[in-house]
């Protein structure tokens, strides 16, 4: 019984390691065109349907039939820039704007998550409540919801307040704290201690 694959498709499948007998059995299973491999989905399923095909041949066949769907089975992605624009080497994941991720383990929180709840994965507070060094309001996240300032760690809040009193711009304070080395931070802590006396 002839298979409905085109002559070129039959030659390609033969080159991938599929015999004419296996082509006929693929047709009997309902795989009659390249698009039918989308339903099969992965090499393991193809081997389950046709055990004598072998995992290596199944991988080559699906890499040819589904090159975009199976990047690991297909040829490695070219990471060289095309016309100056970088190409994506990993899949792009788009999340909704209301998605909340734990700051400790990056686990996505369930839809019924409320501010201050513990992470359902690691048990720590998913979004710690931080105090803003600029307007003194508090809230979760990485940025103040009142003035837009980037939160600094609670341990460095006193240093941020000192830099604010020194006239450093709101957006420059987190960057400046990150850029300071240990001895420079010790000098600032000395100024904080003297101001408390």
Image (cartoon, helix red, strand yellow):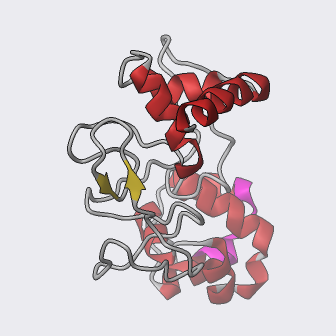
Q: Magenta stretch: residue 22 in it?
A: yes
Q: Residue at x 51, y 18 (%)?
A: 82
Image spot of residue 38 (x, y percent): 45, 68
Q: Magenta stretch: residue 103 in it?
A: no
Image spot of residue 94 (x, y percent): 36, 53
Q: Is residue 181 left or right of residue 144?
A: right
Q: Residue at x 54, y 47 (%)?
A: 153
Image spot of residue 77 (x, y percent): 63, 38
Task: Examine the rendering and report whether any part of residue 193 can be seen.
Answer: yes
- Quadrant of res 101: bottom left
Residue closest to the eye, 31 or 149: 149
- Quadrant of res 141: bottom left
Give the prevailing secondary structure in the magenta stretch.
Answer: helix
Q: Is residue 55 left or right of residue 68?
A: right
Q: In the image as oriented, which residue stretches furthest toward the left?
A: 146
- Quadrant of res 62: bottom right
Magenta region, residue range = 15-23
Residue closest to the eye, 161 or 95: 161
Task: Examine the rendering and report whether any part of residue 79 can be seen.
Answer: no
């Amino acid at each position: 019984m002839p298979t409905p694959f085109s002559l070129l498709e039959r030659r390609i499948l033969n080159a991938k390691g599929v015999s004419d007998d296996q082509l006929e059995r693929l047709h009997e299973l309902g795989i009659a065109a390249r698009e039918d491999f989308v339903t099969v989905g992965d090499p393991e399923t193809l081997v389950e349907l046709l055990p004598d095909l072998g995992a290596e041949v199944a991988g080559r066949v699906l890499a040819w039939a589904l090159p975009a769907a199976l990047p690991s089975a297909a040829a490695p992605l070219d990471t060289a820039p095309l016309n100056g624009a970088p190409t994506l080497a990993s899949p792009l994941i788009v999340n909704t704007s209301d998605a909340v991720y734990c700051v400790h383990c990056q686990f996505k929180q369930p839809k019924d998550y409320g501010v201050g709840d513990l992470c359902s994965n690691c048990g720590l507070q998913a979004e710690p409540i931080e105090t803003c060094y600029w307007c003194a309001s508090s809230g979760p996240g990485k940025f103040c919801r009142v003035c837009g300032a980037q939160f600094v760690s609670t341990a460095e809040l006193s240093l941020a307040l000192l830099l604010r009193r020194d006239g450093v711009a709101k957006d420059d304070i987190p960057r400046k704290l990150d850029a300071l080395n240990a001895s420079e931070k010790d000098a600032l802590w000395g100024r904080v201690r003297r101001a408390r006396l």
